[in-house]
Image (cartoon, rainbow, N blue to C red):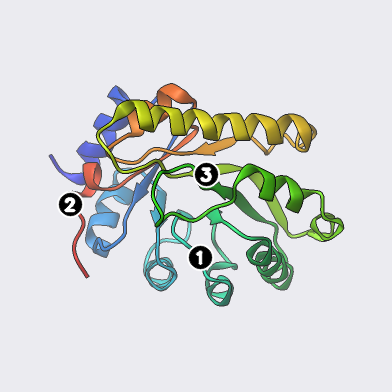
Amino acid sequence: MGVSENIKSLLINDIPKNVKLIAVTKTKPISAILEAYNSGYKIFGENKVQELSDKYQALPKDIEWHMIGHLQTNKVKYIAPFVHLIHGVDSFKLLQVIDKEGQKNNRKINCLLQFYIAKEETKFGFDLPEALHMIQLPEFNDLKNVNIVGVMGMATFTENTHTIRAEFKELVYIFNQLKNTFFQDNPDFKEISMGMSNDYKLAIEEGATLVRIGSLIFGERNII
């Protein structure tokens, strides 16, 4: 099946209406993205700033771009003018830089707080006490150009579904704690980004509102 058929199949068979599919385009050519776009799909995710920026320049401007990878503070300025949602906010310093760049671009930038839920050393993110501490800092309230809309986490890369499910449950628990304690009055705080090609069905079962799927749509990742 082609790219557009793969997306259609996922949306019809696996992904309920209340969950948003982010088609992950990392390493994929413009032609593959245009195939999806021309079939009507416009929600894409990239994990590298340079690639995201290049693709934004080359493609139609009504695409909704998600930055799903680890984001360095010195790269925020390149995506601040157009990015729809930054998934991987893993430090207060990064949040402050996003706020500053949002101000420069006269826009409020949507962000997810990334939490470390995996049993792997390679993942980034807050733990719950760190996030609670940050949210209660006086400086946190000074952020006027970021909009915290939810949480993101990456499960351990394993075939053990019990481990994956437990980690997704942990992220949902964190989301509920934050929502009930700090974000009750923010209707935008509603997103739980978790689940990729190998575990998105479990993620949806556990409450994901955003899933990030690449290889099931575009084929295996190109090595660059």
Looking at the image, residue 76 lies above or below residue 124: below
* Residue 70, image x, y percentages: 47, 62
Q: What kind of residue is marked 2? A: Glu
Residue 30 occupies quadrant: bottom left
Answer whether labels 1 and 2 touch (C-beta < 8 Å): no
Q: Is residue 64 left or right of residue 14?
A: right
Answer yes or no: is residue 211 visible. yes
Q: CA distance from mark 1 to mark 2?
A: 23 Å
Q: Secondary structure at mark 3?
A: strand
Residue 135 as seen in the image, left or right of residue 71: right
Residue at numbered disc 3: 152
- What residue sits 40% from the left and 60% below the top? 47
Residue occupied by mark 1? 71
- x and y percent of residue 208 in the render? 48, 31
- Precedes in sequence: disc 1 or disc 2: 1
Of pointers 3 and 2, the one earlier in the residue sequence: 3
Label disc, if present, on residue 220 of the rendered structure: 2
Question: Could you tell me which secondary element the residue under label 2 belongs to?
Answer: loop
Query: In the drawing, does residue 3 fall left or right of residue 105?
Result: left
Q: Position of residue 153 (x, y in %)?
A: 48, 44
- Residue 124 position in % (x across, y down): 49, 56
Amino acid type, mark 3? Met
Task: Give the answer, above or below, for where 174 lies relative to 84.
Answer: above
